[in-house]
Image (cartoon, grey):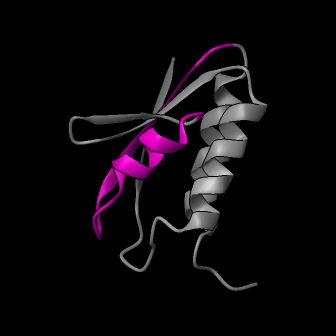
Amino acid sequence: MINRIVNVNDQLEFSDTLINEILQTGKNLNSRITLKRNNHVADCRSILEVLLLGTEKCSQLEISADGEDEQIAVQKICNIFNHQGKTE
């Protein structure tokens, strides 16, 4: 199991695009991927859980993955959060 903390940018919203990217990543990998904020945990394959997780400005999320591709899973979810709100 791998865990990583990501700081959520104060300008970042849990937009439809962000949620869709999280869900697609969760569905395309074999590991169980979760996001945790405070005591709330969301499975990255569950739209309802991800929607209910929400986020607050400047909050931290713990990303966890357990399985054969756990390193890739954590990195991909971190990349989603790190690239949101940036212009190319």
| Residue 61 point in image, percent of width and height | 37, 48
Furthest residue in direction left, as rendered: 39
Residue 12 higher or lower than 72, as above or below: below
| Residue 45 point in image, percent of width and height | 60, 33
- The reply to whether residue 78 is visible in this rendering is yes
Residue 9 higher or lower than 63, as above or below: below
Res 57 quadrant in image: bottom left
Say which residue appears at 29% left-offset and 68% top-offset. Answer: 58
| Residue 56 point in image, percent of width and height | 28, 64
Which quadrant, please, contains the C terminus?
Answer: bottom right
Say which residue appears at 64% left-offset and 44% top-offset. Answer: 23
* Magenta range: 45-67
Res 19 quadrant in image: bottom right
Furthest residue in direction front, as rendered: 48
64 inside magenta stretch: yes
| Residue 81 point in image, percent of width and height | 55, 59
70 inside magenta stretch: no
Relative side of 75 to 37, left or right: right
Say which residue appears at 78% left-offset and 33% top-offset. Answer: 28
Relative side of 79 to 7, left or right: right
Residue 87 higher or lower than 2, as above or below: below
Is 10 in front, or is 25? Answer: 25
- How many numbered discs, if any? 0
- The reply to whether residue 79 is visible in this rendering is no
